[in-house]
Image (cartoon, grey):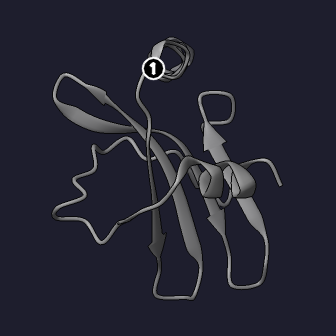
Amino acid sequence: MERIKAETVAYFRALDENATLRHHFRHADEEGGLWYIEAVRDRGELIVIKQAELTSAGQLHRYSWEHLEDERGFLTDQAINPEEDPLEAIPAEEFLRVWTQ
């Protein structure tokens, strides 16, 4: 189990540290929360490397290779497709504003 976690961390860390082009998105969920996503291309797919959930109650939960999961959630391991998923492209500055709160 620890080996799998270490491999997962290494994969997402390498994507984050070697990224030259990052894509940023926002998604509103059914409960009134907002999800902020930073993704990079890997083998033709957009892979989420950072995600932040701002709940309707104002709580912020962040996930990345540095913090993959906790009791409230986890970094998605599914590729995203902005043409099919309900995502809105946003400027990097908007993502960073939320991520660094």
Q: Secondary structure at mark 1?
A: loop
Looking at this rendering, what residue extends furthest in the bottom direction?
Answer: 31
Above or below, 56 against 42 in this view is below
Residue 27: % across, % down: 45, 70
Amino acid type at mark 1:
Ala
Residue 17: % across, % down: 55, 15
Question: Would you say residue 7 is visible in this rendering?
Answer: no
Along the line of sight, the residue nearer the viewer: 91 or 88? 91
Above or below, 71 against 30 in this view is above
Along the line of sight, the residue nearer the viewer: 56 or 88? 88
> Splitting the image into 4 quarters, where does residue 69 fall?
top right
Above or below, 17 against 98 in this view is above
Above or below, 13 against 39 in this view is above
Residue 61: % across, % down: 71, 57
> Splitting the image into 4 quarters, where does residue 97 fall?
bottom right
Within-10-Å neighbours for mark 1: few <14, some 14–19, many 20+: some
Q: Is residue 3 left or right of residue 42?
A: right
Identify which residue is drawn at 45% across, 20% down: 19
Looking at this rendering, what residue extends furthest in the right direction?
Answer: 101
Identify which residue is drawn at 83% across, 55% down: 101
Along the line of sight, the residue nearer the viewer: 94 or 76? 94
Identify which residue is drawn at 68% across, 84% down: 56
Query: Mark 1 sits on what residue?
Result: 19
Question: Would you say residue 96 is visible in this rendering?
Answer: yes
